[in-house]
Image: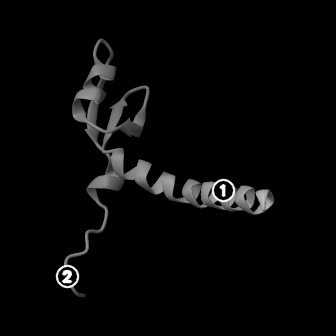
Amino acid sequence: MTYRLLAATAALAIMGSFAAPSAAVAQDRYCLQGRIWGYPGNCQFASYSQCMASASGTNAYCGINPRYAYARRYRGYR
């Protein structure tokens, strides 16, 4: 009985790990760009203010993540 509970918990943890990256990608809306970072740059920022705080004092700027900007958005039926 204990092994079944352990197996069920492990299965839920594995299934949850597959769903986590897709949610993280949706939050990365801004990229730190510049001479050092290139294009698209360091795309780990959820808000523009987070990105600008990292860019302050450097020769870098923030731009929208191309994966977010050009993602397909489905509206209604096709």
| Quarter of the figure with the C terminus | bottom left
Query: Label 2: which residue?
Result: 76
Could you say which is closer to the camera, residue 9 or residue 49?
A: 9
Residue 14 placement: quadrant: bottom right
Distance of label 2 from label 1 (alpha carbons): 37 Å
Look at 69% across and 56% down and name the residue there.
10
Q: Dot 2 lies on which element?
A: loop
Q: Is residue 78 left or right of residue 32?
A: left
Mark sitting earlier along the chain (2/1)? 1
Vertical relation: 36 (above or below) 23: above
The reply to whether callout 2 and callout 1 are in contact (CB within 8 Å) is no
Which residue is farthest front?
1
- Mark 2 nearby-residue class (10 Å; few <14, some 14–19, many ≥20): few
Could you say which is closer to the camera, residue 30 or residue 15?
A: 15
Q: Amino acid at mark 2?
A: Gly
Mark nearer the viewer, 2 or 1 = 1
- From the top left corner, tell me how far across and down residue 74 is, in percent: 25, 74
Query: Label 1: which residue?
Result: 9
- From the top left corner, tell me how far across and down residue 43 is, in percent: 39, 39
Residue 12 placement: quadrant: bottom right
Could you say which is closer to the camera, residue 60 or residue 77?
A: 77
Look at 26% across and 36% down and name the residue there.
47
Look at 50% across and 52% down and name the residue there.
21
Q: Amino acid at mark 1?
A: Thr
| Quarter of the figure with the N terminus | bottom right
Residue 53 placement: quadrant: top left
